[in-house]
Image: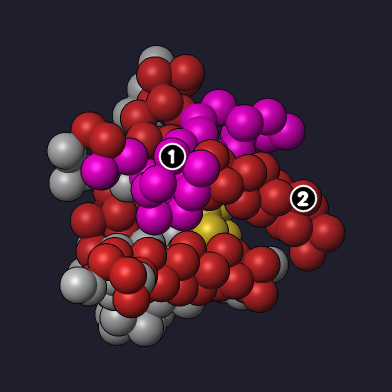
Amino acid sequence: MADRDEQWMCYALNEAYTAARIGEVPIGAIVVCGDRIIGRGYNVREHTHDPTGHAEIIALRQAAQSLGAWRLRDCDLYVTLEPCPMCAGAIVQARIRALIYGASDPKAGYAGSLYDVLADTRLNHRTTVTKGVLAQQCGALLSTFFRSLRTARHCSHTSAPSERN
């Protein structure tokens, strides 16, 4: 199962690379039903000016359209970063069978880091969770992206010596 999860996570990573190429936070997601991808997404919040433009939301919408149903009970969601509260809630609402994610998110993760919505017994659905699949690759992509943003900001505030006069 671990090899299978890694193979699917590579598809989610490809989505994350697409987000990075267009200047979005590099998070990618896919929804798998059986042996096929029925939904895919990457972050587009900056481009769409939409706070719900998260990779998971986009992939879930696409999967629901593909199946013609909002209940995705026999589907698994692969995402490169632990879902936020909004996305964890959407996973529960969509009745996703399993969540498999790469890097943990200690600042906003709601699949075990800050809170575990997906295991809350008060809700009518629980999703099994596998964490840490290709975590190093998923985390490195995010770290590289944010490091380059910090460098770009720092460089834009620093002018060359000849420009200071």
Where is 105 relative to 123, above or below? below
Q: Nearer the viewer, residue 42 or 24?
A: 24
Where is 92 relative to 50, above or below? below
The verdict on residue 24 being magenta is: yes
Q: Quadrant of residue 101?
A: bottom right
Where residue 69 appears, as percent x and y from the top left, is 37, 22
Q: Is residue 93 left or right of residue 30?
A: left
Pointer 1 local density, CA inside 10 Å: few below 14, some 14–19, many at least 20: few
Q: Which residue is mark 1?
A: 22
The verdict on residue 86 being magenta is: no
Give the numbered dot on residue 44.
none
Q: Which residue is mark 2?
A: 7
Q: Nearer the viewer, residue 94 or 157?
A: 157
Calculate the distance from the C-alpha at mark 2 to the C-alpha at mark 1.
Answer: 24 Å
Magenta-drawn segment: 19-46
Q: Quadrant of residue 68?
A: top left
First along the sequence among labels 2 and 1: 2
Q: Count the marks.
A: 2
Q: Can the viewer see residue 1?
A: no
Q: Quadrant of residue 130?
A: bottom right
> Secondary structure under badge 2?
helix
The residue sitting at 31% across, 59% down in the picture is: 88
**Three-letter amino acid code at disc 2?**
Gln
**Three-letter amino acid code at disc 1?**
Ile
